[in-house]
Image: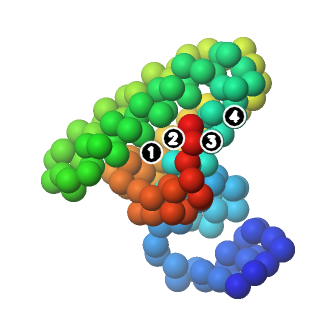
Amino acid sequence: MIRKSRGMKVLMEVLTRRFKGIIVCDGWKPYARFTNRIQRCWAHLLRESKDIAEKFEEAIPLHNALKELYEILTEALENDPPPEVRKTLWQLAREALRHWIMKEYSIEKVRKFIGKINTALTTGSRLSSILVWSRPIIEPKEHCGPMSF
């Protein structure tokens, strides 16, 4: 199905309100209005942080930390660990993200980006539920093309 829009009307037409799955997405606002069962696409997240880091030196440590978190979680989840290990990973990842959210940023684009992560952590989306976020349903390279961060 091809549509010119990615708005709420299209989501309702394609998925309907009966949809109970998890939407893997780029953070487009209609998805969050449709459901709180969202998994933020790592490729989009890391590409956005890379783009910001290339423009603003202030964002370089944040981008590097997100890359490192992705690599740590991907490696840790490679062998499909049990729920208690996943829960520990979830807690550690949330703490790592909170660390970066609590920092003060002087550049508006960096603050806006960090705000997306903060919103996800506080609204219960799958970004905050690292159990899902950290075990990609669809590998980023399969979903969004080759990754280069």
* Mark 4 and mark 2: Cα distance apart in space: 25 Å
Q: Are marks 3 and 4 in contact (CB under 8 Å)?
A: yes
- Secondary structure of the residue carrying numbered label 4: helix
Q: Quadrant of the N terminus?
A: bottom right
* Mark 1 and mark 3: Cα distance apart in space: 19 Å
Q: Position of residue 53 (x, y in %)?
A: 66, 26
Residue 98 visible in the picture? no
Look at mark 1 in the image and give the residue it sits on: 128
Which is in the foreground here, disc 3 or disc 2?
3
Look at mark 3 in the image and give the residue it sits on: 47
Which is in the foreground here, disc 1 or disc 3?
3
Q: Find the residue positioned furthest to the right.
A: 4
| Crowd rating for badge 1 (residues with CA inside 10 Å; few <14, some 14–19, many 20+) | many
- The front one of 147 and 81 is 147
Q: Amino acid at mark 1?
A: Ser
Q: Residue at x 47, y 67 (%)?
A: 22
Q: Earlier in the sequence, mark 4 or mark 2?
A: 4
Look at mark 2 in the image and give the residue it sits on: 122
Question: Which labelled disc corresponds to residue 51?
Answer: 4
Q: Residue at x 63, y 22 (%)?
A: 59
* Mark 4 and mark 1: Cα distance apart in space: 23 Å
